[in-house]
Image (spheres, rainbow, N blue to C red):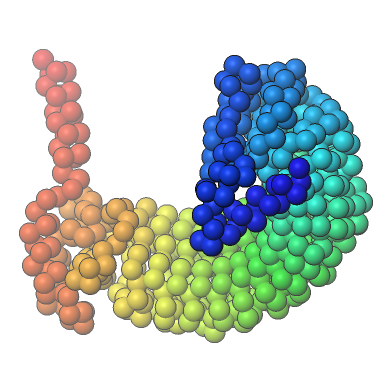
Amino acid sequence: MPSFNTLGAIYALLGLLGLIDYARVMGQQNPPQTCPAVLDISPCVCTVKKNGLDILCEATDLQHINKAMDVLKGKSPIIFYLKLRHNNLPKLQGFLFLALDIRHLTIHNSSLAAIEETALSSLGKGLTQLDVSQNQLSNVPSMALKNLHHLLILNLNHNKISQIHNKAFEGLDTLEILTLYENKISTIEPEAFRGLDKKLKRLNLGGNELTSVPQKSLSILDTLKKLEIQENKIRSIKEGDFEGLKTLDSLILAHNYLTKVPANVFRHLTQLNSLELEGNSITYIDKDAFLGLEENLQYLRLGDNNIHMIPSDALRGLHRLRHLDLRANNISMISEDAFSGFGDSITFLNLQKNDLKTLPAMGFENLNSLETLNLQNNKFTKIAEEVMEPIMDTLRVVDITDNPLICSCDLVWFPNLLQDLKNRDDEMTQKKRPMCTMINEHREYFVQNMPLERMNCIGKNLGRSAYSSATSQHIQNSIQICIAPIISHSVWKLFLTFVVRGA
Ligand SMILES: *[C@@H]1O[C@H](CO)[C@@H](O)[C@H](O)[C@H]1NC(C)=O
Ligand SMILES: *[C@@H]1O[C@H](CO)[C@@H](O)[C@H](O)[C@H]1NC(C)=O
């Protein structure tokens, strides 16, 4: 039988290449895949897919699944997907799938607590994906896995695994993706990932109970591209923690308990493109924190921490940085040279939900590539034209909503920018419209509808070509006073109250 399947695979490949009329050859050599009679495998259901059968068994038990497998064994089809979900299958018994050719196997939310050593071993030649998520496994079922020599993806998410013992994945030398999200892992032994050192590209350890980076076990993963250790209980990271991860492209340390980013901690990650540190309690970033990341880091996420100033000294060497996210921190001021030395490459800057009241006149001078700027939810009463001037030509999206802005000629840059973008067919994608308070009128306006004719802004030389056309449009627009309906409604209610009381 195996040689027959191999032959089929070769014909399929040649067929794909257009060298052989696959259907004709298979028509002669192998009847097309067909499903068993509906009643024979019920409550499982079968559909024919291009690459084989797709079989789904839900809300049933071992006895029914066993029966369905026996029926399938008689026909020896290629089972491209076997999906067993929401069943009662506490134990996967030996030889259950013997003589079946299964490529993708899912046993999900089925109370699975044990997998007998011989339950999966017969699938070694064909199985490429195994998903045993949302079950009751308390250990990596190493003995059952060790013969799966073609496995590419292993999903153990949402189980009860509390430790990963040495050589837990030995034998899985083709594995590229391993995910252990939301288990109870607190211990990872030093040789835990031995055997995965040739091919593993992605490892997800998120949602566990780790209190430190499992450095020894990770250090052999030469080929790893993406490491996720978010949502653990890591209190500190130190130099050497990421040694050995030579090809790492993306590191996610978000939602841990970090308070500091010490010097040299990422020094070995010279290929790193994206670093996520949001949702910690970081107050201190050493000036040498990002040393080693100069050549490749483009995405840095530091949102939801407790940072008090732009960590300029640490960022200065990052001359490839494009995306800097500092949202929801405690930044109350920005210095003139905050972006000097590294601002050139930044296209995205998020300062939303901080404590900013003013911006220094030359603060954004170095941000020559800035396209998206988020200043939403700060304490700005004004954002001066001179601050925005250096970035007006590149800016495509700006959010200044949820600030206590005062309507003034200083803000004219905003309607001008909208007009500019409109002229460039490059309209701001966001629908949010910032508001400002017109002090002497005790009312609010949308910034783009400020009554410029009453503000003595007209004629003020702001040096923008779009200004005059924008102005005439705003004189028309400003007649629609946005807050008026709300005010008149409350005035009306007040009036009614008086009338009723009076009567
Ligand atoms: C898991 O399966 C049980 C039946 O065994 C079902 O009642 C429950 O809704 C399923 N849970 C999820 C999250 O699908
Ligand atoms: C923000 O910083 C100020 C002092 O600069 C401090 O009083 C305040 O507690 C900080 N807020 C948070 C959430 O840490």
Instruction: Judge whether 188 appears above or below 135 on screen.
Output: below
Q: Nearer the viewer, residue 119 or 98?
A: 98
Q: Is residue 6 among the parts visible in the rendering? A: yes
Instruction: Judge whether 9 appears above or below 101 on screen.
Output: below
Tell me residue 146's x, y (percent): 86, 47
Q: Could you tell me which residue is drawn at 45 percent across and 72 percent down? A: 347
Q: Is residue 154 among the parts visible in the rendering? A: no
Q: Could you tell me which residue is drawn at 57 percent across and 32 percent down? A: 34
Instruction: Judge whether 374 appears above or below 393 on screen.
Output: above
Q: Nearer the viewer, residue 306 or 109?
A: 109
Tell me residue 384's x, y (percent): 32, 72
- Residue 395 lies left or right of residue 497; in this view the side is right
Quadrant housing the N terminus: top right
- Residue 216 lies left or right of residue 261; in this view the side is right
Tell me residue 247's x, y (percent): 71, 71
Tell me residue 87's x, y (percent): 68, 23
Q: Quadrant of residue 435?
A: bottom left
